[in-house]
């Protein structure tokens, strides 16, 4: 397991990688700082975008909330800081309307320095109220992906997509966001939304942050629609494990893009690096 120490110096370097002004390999770093560069450096690179990373915070028993729906702070403080760092590294954060309604998520970067990403809510039936925190005007782009004709408040961009068998095809969502200029995306939840992108084979990485907490009952973090009957058929991702402090992070590579991104940061990008999402537009 790699330890992760995010000092001011190392985070400034990661943000410089994000803006294309630095590499993440040179310099003298402690072991924990090297862990931070290994974790965040690949996500900050812009030469390998489009990058689609999903993150879910869960308990030891794989749950994201209690039976009464209490979902606040399943992740510990370091898991939450990690989530904010992910937000700071992507162009846009995607959530399902279930999370937007339940959590009143703001999706802003508050626990580290860095830019606020665009906020995207998948809301096919137009259920999200206009005063939802995710739609608040604060300088960041706000987008809603919907199937219905439903006017939104000024400044909120609407992407209309058709439903196919009652849902949006995740590939159509990615393609539309890419056309809107949003290449690197964080799929932040909830489980229904993440599972849709996972089953469609569209995730570059899946990050599962496990907090030392036993909830006992309540919603599971990820449930796919199509079950595997044999363990041999299940996804066994190429996984790196990072100790964040309060939480343990399983950083799972799911595509060739992920392998390419964890190569030494100064290496030229392999030609297959743009495979998954570049073919979407
Ligand atoms: N621990 C964590 O990391 C974490 C993160 C986020 C959320 N959460 C928790 O997760 C819970 C909510 O998650 P959830 O899984 O129930 O809901 P969700 O994924 O937030 O939202 C699901 C809804 O979004 C819409 N949607 C998503 N993908 C779609 C697609 N491809 N096509 C059409 N519609 C799509 C649908 O809306 P319609 O129902 O209108 O059709 C769907 O029912 C909350 O309790 C929240 O606290 C936990």
Image (cartoon, grey):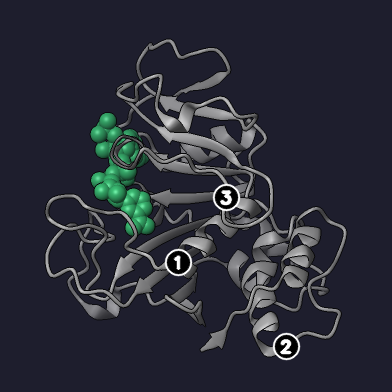
Q: Residue 14 in the image: state x and y as whole percent.
A: 74, 64
Which sits earlier in the primary sequence, circle 1 or circle 2?
2
Q: Residue 271 in the image: state x and y as whole percent.
A: 74, 63
For the point 46% across and 33% down, the residue is 134
Mark 1 and mark 2: Cα distance apart in space: 22 Å
Q: Secondary structure at mark 2?
A: loop
Q: Is residue 131 above or below residue 171?
A: above
* Side of 52 relative to 114 (left or right): left
For the point 83% across and 73% down, the residue is 266
Q: Which residue is mark 2?
A: 30
- In this rendered view, identify the residue nearer to me: 16 or 183: 16
* Side of 176 relative to 179 (left or right): left
* Side of 94 relative to 102 (left or right): right
- In this rendered view, identify the residue nearer to me: 276 or 73: 73
Which sits earlier in the primary sequence, circle 2 or circle 3?
2
Other-residue count near label 3 (Cα within 10 Å), few / some / many at <14 / 14–19 / ≥20 = some
Q: Is residue 184 above or below residue 141?
A: below
Residue 110 is tagged as: 3
């Amino acid at each position: 397991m790699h330890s992760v120490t995010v000092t001011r110096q190392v985070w400034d370097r990661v943000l410089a990688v994000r803006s294309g002004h630095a590499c993440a390999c040179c310099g003298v770093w402690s072991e924990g700082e090297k862990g931070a560069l290994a974790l965040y450096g690949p996500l900050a690179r812009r030469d390998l975008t489009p990058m689609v990373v999903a993150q879910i915070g869960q308990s030891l028993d794989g749950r994201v909330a209690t039976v009464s729906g209490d979902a606040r702070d399943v992740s510990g403080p370091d898991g939450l800081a990690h989530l904010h760092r992910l937000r700071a590294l992507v162009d846009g954060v995607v959530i399902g309307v279930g999370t937007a309604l339940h959590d009143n998520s703001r999706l802003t970067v508050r626990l580290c320095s860095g830019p606020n990403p665009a906020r995207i809510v998948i809301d096919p039936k137009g259920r999200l109220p206009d005063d939802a925190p995710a739609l608040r005007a604060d300088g960041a782009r706000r987008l809603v992906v919907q199937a219905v004709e439903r006017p939104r408040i000024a400044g909120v961009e609407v992407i209309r997509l058709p439903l196919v068998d009652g849902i949006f095809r995740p590939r159509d969502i990615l393609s539309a966001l890419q056309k809107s200029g949003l290449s690197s995306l964080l799929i932040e939840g909830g489980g229904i939304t993440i599972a849709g992108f996972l089953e469609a084979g569209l995730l570059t990485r899946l990050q599962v942050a496990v907090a030392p907490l036993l909830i006992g009952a309540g919603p599971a973090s990820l449930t796919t629609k199509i079950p595997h009957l044999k363990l041999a058929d299940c996804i066994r991702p190429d996984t790196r494990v990072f100790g964040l402090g309060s939480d343990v992070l399983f950083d799972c590579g799911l595509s060739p893009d992920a392998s390419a991104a964890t190569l030494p940061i100064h290496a030229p990008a392999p030609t297959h690096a743009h495979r998954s999402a570049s073919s979407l537009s």
